């Protein structure tokens, strides 16, 4: 079965994915077409003769707004105009029926023919029709306008399921939408981080992410995204920051005239790992797995990317400052003149296959290479709860040459089931002060499975409940179970060459996560996760935690 180019207009099944879904061009095109239809009708009505209402050019009703099976909210509508036209068309028909008997009545045999005078009620009816016609035309001029002088519909605003709150020009060339991501958590550690130096975190409520975003498009083929984050859930990564500040996860501009060749400049996700590229609001779990410790999050640079063969193949190639592994939003400025090149390719080889269960399979690989100097190139490694640091380099450790990362990845989604897995390797030249050059190699991998308990469809992107929660209708939304295993292995040479402290940094960490998700509707989600992580020290001198148990809950709102 062939896939149309618009099949992926709302969100890709896999691949490069911002935390804000792409603009739904189909909805915009529908609104623009409806405005053009209204203007055509207005031109016809201007040529009508108001003195003879029956000569008004008949028009067809405006086409209904586009209906998406996931969208119960219609687009911008002009129903009021249609209702007015229906009203005076009915009155016009009634007038014709009243006048017809008088005009068909035979003339008297003698005397000149004469036209019977119109009754008062008929004259009043025609006057009302004329007044109604003028009202309709005036309303259309104000609402629709003309090509030279756009009316109110020249700035279309509202809300739709896929685009959220928006304001756009009538032709769709200029577009502004204001998405919001809100995540409020409660986190507790029932077993603590057990050990002689446990470092137990207190149970706490936390505003993990608060992102009021602005997504703009100008002259149709230029768009940008800025997403400040007022949350404080990730600030404890950086020991230099002890108070909440506003972060900027994303801030970029993009030219996307060709779907196969787009240019993006600014601050955005590094195109390497698949789980890292998945929108944070779309994860089957509250946070990403241990593999995120060997990958950069955001970086500043320039990238070309695109999709080919109706999204069966996509690629990204970019040059960046070279953000450290396990960074969040703040560590993206260059520490040297050296730059890092990131590249990724992802294929869906069975997208058009006759067997439906094969179409949701995708496989790819991401790579990164570049020199790192004047910094270690590695932020503190943390558990999935983001509350416990299990590995860090000593302060005097710095990069001393090339850093190479690669990440094979695969995923498969079919009906209620979703599978995702990836392997990450990060190797790098390091030295401790004036010590020798050491090439370390860390590796991590993860695999996860999700299953929807309700009759809904699993997705790498946004899950849309078929029956949103409605108590009166006994609809309960979508329910999902998920499980994940992840492991990270640190290079023993990190301890042999005195790059890390063996008393507090681990040689290996293994985590198991189980989660339950309740999608009340397309905007509201409640999640619960239990994460158990085991730690193994590199030497008998290790005295820190041997495990961590984390129980977390989240309420998430997106629109």
Image: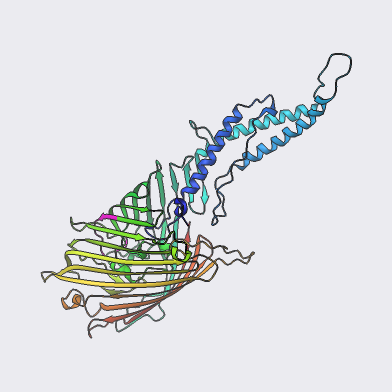
The image shows residue 61 at horizontal and vertical percentages of 62, 40
Quick check: 268 left or right of 353?
A: left
Front in this rendered view, residue 89 or 543:
89
Q: Would you say residue 306 sits in the magenta stretch?
A: no
**In the image, residue 521 lies at what x, y percent?**
53, 62
**Observer-nearest of 197 and 335:** 335
Q: Residue furthest top?
A: 111
Q: Position of residue 144 (x, y in %)?
A: 54, 36
Question: 228 above or below 499?
Answer: above
Give the percent coordinates (x, y) of residue 363: 36, 64
The colour scheme of the drawn protein is rainbow
In the picture, residue 500 is in which quadrant? bottom left
Decide if residue 392 is in sight here. Answer: no
- Which portion, as a residue range, is magenta? 317-329
| Residue 380 in sight | yes
Does 311 sit above or below residue 542? above
Magenta stretch, overall SS = loop
Q: How many marks?
A: 0
Q: Residue at x 87, y 13 (%)?
A: 111
| Relative depth, front residue between 239 and 496 | 496
Q: Nearer the viewer, residue 63 or 526?
A: 63
Residue 49 horizontal side relative to residue 22, left or right? right
Q: Is residue 415 above or below residue 129?
A: below
28 left or right, relative to 473:
left
* x 65%, y 25%: residue: 49
Q: Residue furthest front?
A: 354
């Amino acid at each position: 079965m062939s896939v149309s180019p618009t099949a992926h207009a709302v969100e890709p099944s896999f691949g490069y994915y911002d935390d804000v879904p792409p603009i739904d061009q189909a909805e915009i095109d529908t609104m623009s077409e409806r405005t053009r239809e209204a203007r055509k009708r207005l031109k016809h009505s201007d040529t009508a003769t108001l003195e003879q209402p029956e000569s008004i050019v008949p028009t067809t009703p405006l086409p209904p707004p586009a209906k998406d099976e996931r969208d119960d909210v219609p687009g911008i509508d002009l129903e009021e105009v249609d209702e007015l036209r229906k009203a005076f068309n009915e009155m016009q028909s009634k007038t014709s029926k009243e006048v017809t008997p008088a005009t068909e009545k035979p003339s008297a045999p003698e005397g000149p023919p004469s036209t019977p005078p119109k009754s008062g009620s008929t004259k009043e009816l025609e006057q009302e029709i004329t007044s109604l016609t003028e009202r309709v035309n005036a309303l259309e001029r104000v609402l629709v306008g003309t090509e030279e002088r756009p009316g109110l519909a020249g700035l279309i605003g509202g809300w739709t399921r896929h685009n959220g709150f928006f304001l756009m020009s009538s032709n769709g060339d200029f577009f502004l939408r204001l998405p919001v991501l809100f995540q409020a958590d409660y986190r507790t550690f029932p077993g603590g981080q057990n050990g002689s130096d446990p470092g137990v975190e207190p149970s706490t409520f936390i505003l993990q992410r608060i992102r009021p975003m602005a997504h703009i498009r100008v002259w149709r083929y230029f768009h940008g995204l800025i997403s400040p984050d007022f949350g404080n859930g990730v600030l404890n990564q950086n020991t230099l920051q002890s108070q909440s500040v506003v972060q900027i996860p994303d801030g970029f501009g993009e030219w996307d005239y060709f779907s196969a060749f787009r240019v993006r400049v600014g601050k955005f996700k590094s195109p390497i790992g698949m789980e890292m590229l998945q929108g944070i609001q779309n994860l089957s779990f509250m946070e990403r797995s241990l593999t995120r410790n060997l990958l950069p999050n955001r970086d500043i640079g320039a990238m070309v990317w695109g999709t080919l063969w109706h999204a069966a193949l996509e690629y990204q190639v970019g040059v960046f400052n070279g953000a450290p592994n396990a960074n969040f939003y703040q560590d993206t400025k260059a520490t040297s003149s050296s730059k890092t090149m990131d590249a990724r390719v992802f294929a869906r080889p069975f997208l058009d296959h006759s067997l439906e269960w094969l179409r949701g399979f995708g496989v790819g690989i991401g790579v990164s290479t570049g020199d790192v100097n004047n910094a270690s190139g590695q932020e503190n490694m943390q558990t999935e709860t983001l509350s416990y640091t299990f590995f860090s380099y000593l302060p005097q450790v710095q990069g001393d040459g090339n850093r190479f990362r690669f990440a094979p990845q695969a995923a498969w989604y079919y009906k209620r089931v979703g599978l995702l897995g990836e392997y990450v390797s990060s190797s790098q030249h390091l030295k401790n002060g004036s010590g020798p050059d050491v090439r370390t190699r860390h590796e991590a991998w993860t695999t996860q499975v999700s299953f929807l308990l309700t009759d809904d469809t699993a997705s790498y992107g946004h899950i849309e409940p078929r029956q949103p929660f409605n108590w009166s209708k006994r609809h309960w939304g979508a329910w999902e179970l998920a499980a994940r295993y992840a492991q990270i292995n640190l290079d023993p040479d990190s301890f042999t060459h005195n790059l890390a402290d063996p008393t507090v940094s681990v040689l290996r960490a293994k985590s198991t996560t189980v989660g339950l998700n309740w999608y009340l509707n397309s905007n509201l989600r409640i999640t619960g996760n239990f994460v158990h992580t085991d730690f193994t020290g590199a030497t008998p001198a290790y005295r820190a935690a041997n495990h961590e148990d984390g129980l977390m809950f989240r309420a998430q709102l997106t629109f």
